[in-house]
Image (cartoon, rainbow, N blue to C red):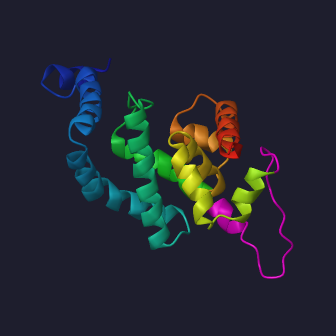
Amino acid sequence: MPASRRNTIQNGGPSVDKIMDEKRDELQEFQQNPNRVLTRLYANCRPKFLGWAKENYRIGAHDLADIFQNAVVIMMLNIESGRLTNLAGTLCTYIFGIGKNLMQAFIRKQKRIEMPGDVKMLQSDEGDPGIETQMIEEQDNESLWAKVDALGEPCRSILILTYKENMTSQEIADVLGYASAEVVRQLRKRCIDKMRKP
């Protein structure tokens, strides 16, 4: 260890253990008082995220605000479901990671927007016909999405990220903390099978 780093630790500077405790404390604080942590994230992290995203992505301010909100919701779901138990950084850096994936999916979706008169081509290498085709074609159908909401988690998040946000299975695995894209595909298939049942 370099002498300057050793001195910092010995002279009361932050130790690695202390930094790890602070990260754990942030998760525990969220579980005890989510409103306080969310208020802090919106006050401190949101402006940083919006400024960084505006510099690095060609996305409008309104859409960036929605993406930040979606990233916060995903973070909350991951904490509440027990998928997020350790942080490599802070909750803010975790939101940045989720937000980056959401922005990339948003950009891909924008590139696929059709012009009037274009022939509609479904692009799905992971799906089968039936309910999936219906979900893509009827994204604004309230009764269909009410069925998705009724499935609960994790189906709700997986189906929304797949069919509304156009995220790939690997991106969903990264955002929601699953081990692989294959796990997401299997879960999505089970969710769709549940929707097919009367």
Give the position of the N terminus as an image quadrant: top left
* Residue 72 forms part of the magenta stretch: no
The residue at the far left in this view is 11
Residue at the image point whose x is 41% and y is 29% from the top: 82
* Percent coordinates x, y for residue 89 in the rendering: 37, 36
Closest to the observer, 138 or 20: 138
- Would residue 94 be visible to someone looking at this image? no
Residue 57 sits in which quadrant? bottom right
Q: Is residue 71 above or below residue 112?
A: above
Please state if 45 lies on the left or on the right of 74 as rendered: left
Q: Is residue 171 above or below residue 69?
A: above
| Residue 93 seen anywhere in this rendered image of the structure | yes
Question: Which residue is at the far bottom?
Answer: 116
Q: Which picture quadrant has residue 22?
A: top left
| Residue range (magenta) | 106-129
Q: Which residue lies furthest to the front in this view?
A: 198
Is 184 left, or right, of 86 in this rendering?
right
Q: Position of residue 162 (x, y in %)?
A: 64, 50
Please, what is the dominant secondary structure of the magenta stretch?
loop
Work out which residue is located at the far right of the displayed protein and give it: 119
Q: Foreground residue, 72 or 46?
A: 72
Instruction: Check the picture and name the quadrant holding the C terminus.
Output: top right
Number of callouts in the render?
A: 0
Left or right of 191? Residue 70 is left
- The residue at 58%/52% (across/down) is 147
**Residue at coordinates 38% horizontally, 27% vertically from top-left?**
86
